[in-house]
Amino acid sequence: MTRDQDQNVASGREAEESPDFSHASVPLAKQLIAAGELRKARLMLEQLVEQTPDAEALVTLATLEIDNPKRQPAALDHLKRALELAPQHTEAWLHLANYWGLKGQADKQRRCLEKILSYDKANRDARDAVELLVTRK
């Protein structure tokens, strides 16, 4: 391999390690998630929420973090921040309910679901989940 080729290979590796997110967006991050590029999506979303946090980016990032026990505290923080920005963000409430369910906190889980029903009485996901919690007791 020539020196120029070796430099190109090294440059390619650097590009993989620190991707260019100059066109970062939630839809692009969701495309990366769909393609299985979870690490790239997470890095992109982290950059987005650091620069200009919005509820959709925070919820999408939390979705990637919630199943990883090491990242669950960050997921909780991101969901809370999303709800501060958009108090009626149903997806954020559903993920927060899921978080509390994973932690075995059924009362907190139910309160999240009831919050959704307070502004969207017809929400079938929240209604079904509350019924399931009640029948489990």
Image: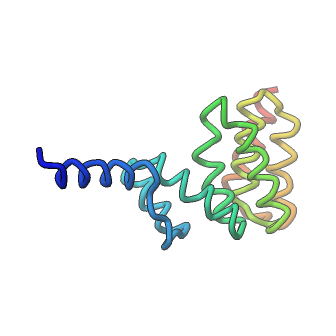
Camera-nearest residue between 64 and 16: 16
| Residue at the (75%, 64%) spot, across then down | 89
Quadrant, the C terminus = top right
Q: How is the image coloured?
A: rainbow
Quadrant, the N terminus = top left
Specify whether 107 is left or right of 71. Answer: right
Q: Is residue 66 above or below residue 12?
A: above
Residue at the far bottom: name it. Answer: 23
Specify whether 104 is left or right of 67. Answer: right
Camera-nearest residue between 52 and 130: 52
Residue at the far front: name it. Answer: 3
Specify whether 105 is left or right of 71. Answer: right
Q: Position of residue 101 (x, y in %)?
A: 74, 34
Residue 136, by quadrant, is: top right
| Residue at the (78%, 27%) spot, across then down | 104
Camera-nearest residue between 84 and 122: 84
| Residue at the (75%, 38%) spot, across then down | 73
Q: How many numbered discs sit on the rendered protein?
A: 0
Specify whether 111 is left or right of 4. Answer: right
Residue 66, by quadrant, is: top right
Residue at the far left: name it. Answer: 1
Q: Position of residue 83 (x, y in %)?
A: 81, 60
| Residue at the (42%, 61%) spot, across then down | 31
Q: Is residue 83 above or below residue 106?
A: below
Q: Is residue 111 above or below residue 49?
A: above
Q: Position of residue 59 (x, y in %)?
A: 67, 57
